Image (cartoon, rainbow, N blue to C red):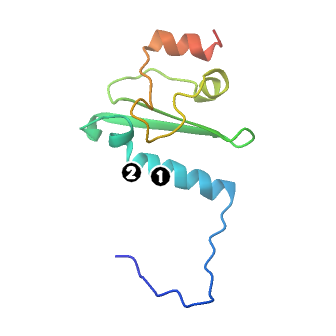
Amino acid sequence: MINERKLEKGKYRIIKISKEALWEFIYESIIDKQGIFFDISDETVITSHHDIDFESGNYICLVKNNIDSEQIDLQALLNNMEDTTQSLYEPNRYREFSIDELVTLQLGK
């Protein structure tokens, strides 16, 4: 349970965080809601992989089934892929790819 305290009149509360803490917040928030964001009902059958480019501010998250052993270069996808959505709250926020399509994207084609 969150410890709630009344904010007194004339007082201010501030949270300031580093880019690393912001990355952690994004990462943990996506993990907490990955079933919703990726339309997956059984989260026990997937693993997620994340990366962020602090210079551009771009973030990428890939989910795959646990039996998939293919290695994906998230940095290459970050650099070569268009955004999949303008908002995590849009109905079509993710795109689904085969391994061959991801390899092509990683190569910038």
Query: Mark 2 belongs to which amino acid?
Result: Asp
For the residues labelled 2 and 1, the Cα–Cα distance comes to 6 Å
Residue 86 drawn at (x, y percent): 54, 35
Instruction: Using the image as rendered, state which of residue 75 and residue 86 is in the foreground.
Output: 86
* Residue 82: percent from left, percent from top: 60, 23
Kindly give the residue lying farthest to the right in the view shown. 55
Name above or below for residue 60 compared with residue 67. Answer: below
Residue 28 bears which disc, if any? 1
Q: Is residue 13 left or right of residue 97?
A: right
Crowdedness near tag 1: few (<14), some (14–19) or many (≥20) residues, C-alpha within 10 Å: few
- Please indicate whether residue 97 sits to the left or right of residue 39 in the image: right
Task: Locate the N terminus and report the quarter of the image it occupies.
Answer: bottom left
Residue at horizontal 45 percent and vertical 32 percent from the top:
93
Q: Are marks 2 and 1 in contact (CB under 8 Å)?
A: yes
Residue ID for mark 2: 32
Q: Residue at x 51, y 39 (%)?
A: 87
Q: Residue at x 53, y 38 (%)?
A: 50
Element on which disc 2 rests = helix
Q: Which mark is residue 64?
A: none
Coordinates of residue 13 in the picture (x, y in percent):
61, 79
With respect to residue 107, does 71 lie above or below? below
- Viewer-proximal residue, 48 or 68? 48
Q: Quadrant of the C terminus?
A: top right
